[in-house]
Image (tube, rainbow, N blue to C red):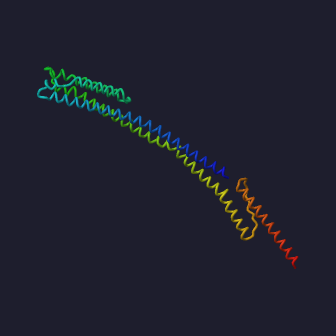
Amino acid sequence: MRKKIALALGVIAAMLLISGVIAVVEYRQMSSRVSELITEDIDNISVSQKIAATSERFNLRILDVVTSSDSLEAVESYDLDLAIQECRDIFLELDRVRKMRLTDSLMNAFSAYMAESRNCLSVIPSDIYDSKRWYFDVLQPYYNTLTRTIDAYNEDIHEDLAVKAEDFHSGFYRSIIPGLVTVIAGLLLLLLLLFYIIAYYITPIRRMMDSMEDYIRRGRRYSYEFDGDDELHRLNRDISEIAQENVELRKRIKLLRDQIQGEDR
């Protein structure tokens, strides 16, 4: 009996342990992968914001130059080397982050805008070109194309994040399903174990007690029997034998008493 119960409880404990380990491993793998992908998207967003900030700053600076009352002095203060270096830094960051669907388009649009913006150094001092017309008719379309590309790039990142969020959502359920199935199976096994204990141990013990009470209080014969080969079955058999021996002993005692009373008469 002890071995059977211990075996059943051991099986249930092993199932719950295995399900817990599987759920933890699945969740950690999924969490690590999703965190990695989200970090990549955050890096892409950061680069996109730098491109937007840099291009907007350059665009406002050039607008300030072409509308300045002293355009020549303003253009001389324009730091072209700094603009080129910031452009190179952004290109390096774009190469470092994960490549998106519109990465090449963004690089091309930014390169085209920066290349045209550097022409301000030759356009503004020139007597041939109208710097304001150049800004609004030539440079501004490049800037508008760049801003549209940045918006499309950011939208692409957000769509990618939405897909990853959905993957995380479905992956979360995939990670808990093995544990959930095992827990349900463990509960069913517990119910079966409870039914087994009640049917094969608690019920026989109660009937043994009822038969013993009938035997002791009412003098009825102890007659409860059931099939089995475990400790409880051997105990019931021993009780039955002891009860039967006690009946035989009472009979012999009564017979001896009757004989003694007969001799006394």
Total labels: the figure holds 0
> At which x and y percent is residue 129?
16, 22
- Choose between 206 and 40: the one closer to the eye: 206
- Residue closest to the far front: 264
- Residue closest to the far left: 69
Compared to residue 248, the image places residue 12 above or below, namely: above
Compared to residue 237, the image places residue 118 above or below, namely: above
- Residue closest to the far bottom: 265
- At a point 20% along the width and 25% down the height, the residue shown is 79
Does residue 25 appear left or right of residue 12 in this picture?
left
Does residue 139 appear left or right of residue 39 in this picture?
left
- At a point 25% along the width and 27% down the height, the residue shown is 142
Q: Quadrant of the C terminus?
A: bottom right
Does residue 145 appear left or right of residue 166 in this picture?
left
- At a point 37% along the width and 34% down the height, the residue shown is 41
- Choose between 18 and 237: the one closer to the eye: 237
> At which x and y percent is residue 13?
58, 47
> At which x and y percent is residue 57?
23, 31
Q: Quadrant of residue 253?
A: bottom right
Q: Quadrant of residue 164?
A: top left
> At which x and y percent is residue 219?
75, 70
Q: Quadrant of residue 118?
A: top left
Compared to residue 36, the image places residue 218 above or below, namely: below
